[in-house]
Structure formats: C-alpha cells, structure tokens
Amino acid sequence: AVYSIPRRRGKNFEIVFVAILLGKMVWSCCAVGCTNRYGLPGIRFFSFPCDEIQRQKWIAAIRREKWSPTRNSKLCSAHFISGKPSRGPIHPDYVPSIFSYTANSVSPSSRYLRAVKRSKTAAVPVQSAHARQTSCQESSQCQVKETDGLGKSTGDGEDMEECLDDATGKELEDNEYIDYNDSEDEGLKEHDESGDTDEEGYIDDLERTGDDETDQSSDEGLIHQLELKEVEIGELQIDNKILVQDNERLGEENLLLKSQLSELMCVHNITSSALKSQKSNEFSARVLKGDDKKVCFYTGLPSYDVFKGLYQLLEPLLLKDESKSYISLIDELLLVLVKLRLGVPNHDLGYRFNISSSTVGTIFHKWIDVMSVELKCLIHWPDSITLRENMPSGFRKHFLRVRCIIDCFEIFIERPSALLARAATYSNYKRHNTVKVFIAVTPTGSISFISQAWGGRVSDKEITQRCGFLNKIERGDQVMADRGFNIADDLAVCGAHLVIPSFTRGKSQLSQMEVEQSRRLARVRIHVERIIGQMRKKYTILHNTLPISLIKCPSDSSKTNCTIDRILIVTAALTNLSPSVIPP
C-alpha cells in the first residue's frame, strides 16, 4: 500500500492517519541497553542522518561492533539532551550523547544553555503558536476529506496545511530536518519494487507535531536563531574544510613543481658543464677524425683507421665503470698514446683532458696492462721459409740465411734512491743510470724480439744469454750483430753462425775481401739502428728520462712484467704497425 499525505496537513487528519498506522509500525531504539519502544509517552524516534560525517559520528556514539544502520534503524529521543537531534556541528545534540555507558554529565547542555543566554540579547520576539494559528484560521477555512481510506486531501487541503505550519512554528522546522534525513535516506535506496514510501518519516512528523503544542515564545525563538547560526557555522566549516583541502593540494603541487624544477636545474647544470667542457676541452678523439697527420703526430699510428681499429680491438676488454675518469674510452686510449708518443707528464695530460693527474696515471697503467697482453702478438718471430720468400733485395744476394739483426739500446732513468739499484743501473758507457734492452729485427724491418729491461751495468753478451733469445735460433741460421756481441760460441751450440764485421786484431790492415765484406755488412746492419731510432723517435717516452714510477710500480709483482717491460712491448708492437724503413 502507498501512504501519501500532503506536507501541510490538519491536526485531526494527522491523528486519524496515526491511528491507521499504529497497528503496522512497531519501532525500538537501536542503542545498546535501551528498551524504549514505539508508543511510550514522550518518546520520539529519529532516523539516521544522510550526511555521511554526522551519520558516522552517530554510529561511533552507539558503540556497536561490526554494525551499520539500515533504513529501519531508529534512535529514540532519550539519547539527546534536548530530546531531538540538531544539524549544527557545534550543537550538543549534533551527536547523541546520553547512553548507558556514559556518566551523567551536564557539560554539553551547559555549553548549549550558555550559548542561548549569550544570544538572548540579539533575540527577536517570536509570535506565539496560538496567535499564529488564530490568524491563519481567520484568513482561510480548512477542510479534510478522506479518500480511499488512505488520508489523501482534496479541495482546500493546502489552506489547511498552511494553518498547521503556522500553528506548529519551530517544531515543524525540526520535523523538516528529520523528514529531510528520512526522505533523503530512503530516496537514495529507491525501493521501487514494493513502491512503499517512507512511512516512518511521516509517522515521525505526526508524532512530533502532536507532542508539544505549548507556547515557548522567547526561548524557542532564540533556539531557532541559534540553530540558524549553527547551520551557517557548519556551512562555513565545510567551506573551510574544502579550502584546507585545496590548500593542501596546492601545497603538494607546489612541492612537486619544486622537485621538478630542481631536477631540471640539475639537468641544466650538467648540460651546461658538459657544453663548457666540450668547448674548453677541444682535445679529444673527435679532433683526429679525418686527419691522418694529426693521428700520426699524436699517436704515432699511420692513419685514423688504424687508430679506430686498435680501439675496437681493445674496447671489449675494458669496462668504463672501472675508471673514475669523466672521459670516454676512446679518449682514454688517445691519452695513453699521446703519453707514449710525446712523453708529456701527467699534469699536462690532465690539463688537456680536463682531469686530475692521478686519474691520468690510473688510466695509463690500466690501458698499458691490457695493451701489453693483446698487442704482444704483433711482435712475431717468423719462420725461415716465410722470411726467405719475403727477403729484401739488399739481403737476398749475400745474406740470404740471415734470420735477424740484433742490438742493444739504453734508456735514461731517474737516479734510484736504493744504493743497490743505483749501482745496478749505472752505465759506464752513458755515464748515467739507465736500463738496457735487447732487440732483434728481421731483414724485412719488423721487430721480432724484444727483451725485458735490464740494469745499464749488464753487458750485451749477458743479456743475450739470459733473455731467451737463443731459444728461438734454429740450426743453419745466421745472426747479424755488431763487434760487441761476442756470442759466436753460444750460437755455435745452437748450430747457428754469427755474422759481424771483420777485426784488425793481430793484423796491420784488412784484406780487400774483408773490407768489401765489412762494407756490405755495414750497409744492411744499419737497419737495426734505424728501427731502434724509429721506435724511440716515434715514441719519445723512450727517449726521455723515465721516472721511477714508470720503471716499476708498487703493484707490479715478481712474476709479472714491470711497467717498463709493458711499455717496451706496446711501443715495439705499435712500431710494427708503421711502414717498414727497409726498402723491399
């Protein structure tokens, strides 16, 4: 059944409607420990508000675990100080406060009464309900007709409703608050299947309309004004909450924008420093591209293609994160080659590449270790058959069986602080502390053997015997050398023959054949000195005085080559990449 009565209705009609519904609606309070039921005198029931904040506060005040109100859940007037709820957030009855678990406290009502007393000074006298009712009755006549047994009004029902509104005064306003919540709550649920309207809300109106009809002129007017102020305060609090939320959102956006700005500033600074570094540091591998003269001057290599191929060979063996430098790997290779080629100190390279001198040393030792292992294959000892097939014309006629040309050269070093090392490296021939190196060159002009560095005091014969050169000699080979190499007996043991210039020892002069043989020998033996000169001229680090740090590092062990040995291997291998000084 559908129960629908007009909003503005007469008192008699409301009583009849309540009588019709009494047998159908039986309510009880949902508060814990409360036994109030419908029908008790002075007890009214209220639906839960639709406002989510106030609704949650009501649920929290009831203190029922794992419970949520339904459309039929009601709360009686015994739990409110004034007997009814209020929509003002600061009103003591905004949330029910009288329960079995709470102590009897008058603080909420006391605050409420003090607020009422403060507002009395600005109160406006309110006309009594009886006077308003009399005025309304004189202006119109109210008739109530029963239709279909359901209480629908016809004719002048609306005039009757206006009279009822004037008669009930402030109490109707309170009912409108409850009706708003009830109708809103039920409207959201939309029980379209049954077609029922909110009967509880209408009964609530009827009960509360018929309860109090006494005249509360001044106090009721003050309460009405106070509630209006409370509503305004509530609206302002809602607006303030919205503004606070907007302020927090804007604050978060501001922080986000600040972080983005700081990131952009960091990127800008990095980009600016990179651009400045690129402008100030024009010395890099990009400068060598397409200019073979610069490549030859700075690296000693014949062309940029050879330089690029060397980099591609060594790049997989090096990891960029192993170095603390801020330059690319190809620039690191260029740094190493420039140091070998020009023999410049680490400070000079640090200024050129915009890095510290200690970083230059780290990069140099890292690359030398790798290059000495990978490029050692370029120092190749050829077999006799291949060598004879490619023998130059200067050797082919008179020295076809010559396997190599040998010699020794010395490199100046700083004076060691240790007395034993100082004595072992002092050279009587150079009158300086040196290291001596044994080298063997093929007739085609390539370096086929280079020994480790020895102290300058050692003789050529001792180096030849102990450096491992004799292990490579085969039977029938000829070894060309200077007069200082007295190793004929050692070569004879291997089945080889030593070819050196003739001596005048015990003779007044050389024979014509010996002179001619010595001249032919001198013309081809000079090639070893030319190749040594080419290597030392091409890589001037061997021509300068080497510091002790490049002779042996603290990290060098006795089982591995020293730093100077690695440098000799790398320079000899890179020299073999250059065109031969011996004509074919």
Image (cartoon, rainbow, N blue to C red):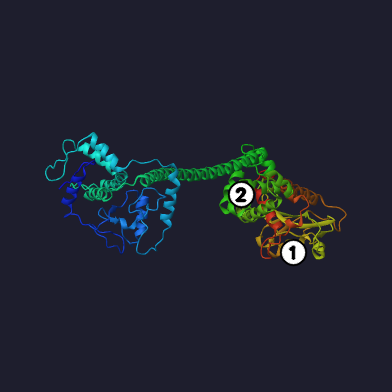
Q: Residue furthest right?
A: 508
| Secondary structure at numbered mark 1 | helix
The spot of residue 581 in percent (x, y) is 69, 44
* Foreground of the two, 235 or 368: 235
Q: Residue furthest left?
A: 148
The spot of residue 340 in percent (x, y) is 70, 49
For label 1, the residue is 489
Crowding at dot 1, Cα within 10 Å, few <14 / some 14-19 / many 20+, comes out as: few
The amino acid type found where label 1 is placed reads: Asp
For label 2, the residue is 389
Q: Is residue 343 visible?
A: no
> Residue visible at 40% across and 55% down?
109
* Foreground of the two, 328 or 102: 102
Q: CA distance from mark 1 to mark 2?
A: 29 Å
Task: State the count of labels.
Answer: 2
Residue contact at pointers 1 and 2, CB within 8 angstroms: no
Q: Is residue 416 left or right of residue 191?
A: right
The amino acid type found where label 2 is placed reads: Glu
- Marked residue nearer the N-terminal end (1 or 2): 2
Q: Is residue 333 left or right of residue 410?
A: left
Crowding at dot 2, Cα within 10 Å, few <14 / some 14-19 / many 20+, comes out as: few
Residue 37 marker? none
| Secondary structure at numbered mark 2 | helix
Q: Is residue 190 visible?
A: yes
Image quadrant assignment for residue 380: bottom right
Image quadrant assignment for residue 505: bottom right
